[in-house]
Amino acid sequence: MEGGGRPSLGQFILLGTSSVVTAVLYSVYRQKAQVAQELKGAKKIHLGEDLKNILSEAPGKCVPYAVIEGAVRSVKETLNSQFVENCKGVIQRLTLQEHKMVWNRTTHLWNDCSKIIHQRTNTVPFDLVPHEDGVDVAVRVLKPLDSVDLGLETVYEKFHPSVQSFTDVIGHYISGERPKGIQETEEMLKVGATLTGVGELVLDNNSVRLQPPKQGMQYYLSSQDFDSLLQRQESSVRLWKILALVFGFATCATLFFILRRQYLQRQERLRLEQMQEEFREHEAQLLSQASPEDRESLKSACVVCLSNFKSCVFLECGHVCACRECYRALPEPKRCPICRREITRVIPLYNS
């Protein structure tokens, strides 16, 4: 707390930072909670013979947010894995990721760093069909790459370490970057895999489509069942709620600390003003009752003991108000009895 009774710049920065972090965490928590609430309210529909009847009776032949589970089946052609034999799918994602060590000039440590240098995703049209045989119904899945949780399975993964000469090693140490290698990964949504779709279910020209919702709700194509997907979302909500509460409590504690320090500073300032007023009144009373010779002595008397002469100059405030014995008796940190500024130096005062 500064001498004027106002919070310091550091306290303002601490309070502002904690408030901003709390607001951001609370905003994320509200978004996560809304997503979990929407997911919990999604209508679970069984992928069976009565699916078209359910949609034909729905308003606009559409269920705005529905949950449906089924097996993946390609419509025409399939995608073959580039690395695994007899591995067929409907979505294929190939990724090249660079791994390297980067020197941190602040911590003076080598930190792991990775960056995707190339990624390609291939898709073919596919349906969701029932696991049971003999049920002639299928749901066409549209825009699968718009899903926030695309249930791809890693079918191939290999790390290619970088080969370096002695000259390369010296150059990397000088530049602050040490390449480790390239990670090659292939992910696929296999034919026959179980998929949980959450989105808009529409009946159009005797065909059923699953597509991203129009109301801005999340679109899911997950390899998890619906209960596991909902449980994961609720766990995320609880985590963000705890973080928001912790930082909110820290913000409240910081605000309470600043207000308490300001209150105590104001009380101390009022107490000192009252003491100075009482001293001036007492000094004026003594001067009015004293003889002319005693008045000169009182003007030069120490404001603390009123018996010894003033013999110290306090810096940096410059007040001459106390004797040497009373200065030594001041509690640490020593402050001027007049203005309460901290005493950094004391210069002896000699009266001729």
Image: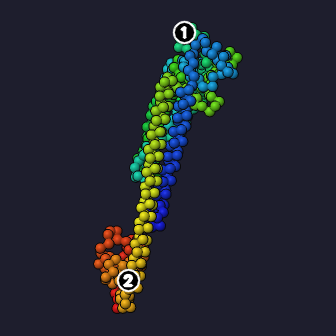
State which tag comes first along the sequence, 2 or 1: 1
User: Which quadrant would the C terminus be assigned to in this image?
Assistant: bottom left
Foreground disc of the pair 2, 1: 2
Q: Which mark is residue 286?
A: 2
Q: Secondary structure under badge 1?
A: loop
Residue at the far top: name it. 134
Mark 2–mark 1 Cα distance, whole angstroms, equals: 111 Å
Pick the front one: 71 or 247: 247
**Residue found at the far right of this picture:** 205
Kind of residue at disc 2: Leu
Instruction: Determine whether the residue tagged by mark 2 lies in a helix, strand or loop.
Output: helix
Query: Looking at the image, which residue is at 48% across and 63% down?
Result: 6
Residue 165 screen position, x and y as percent: 42, 44
- Residue 68 screen position, x and y as percent: 56, 20
Residue 133 numbered mark, or none: 1
The image shows residue 145 at horizontal and vertical percentages of: 59, 29
Q: Is residue 252 above or below residue 146?
A: below
Q: Can I make out residue 302 in this image?
A: yes
Q: If the image is split into quadrants, where does the N terminus sit? A: bottom left
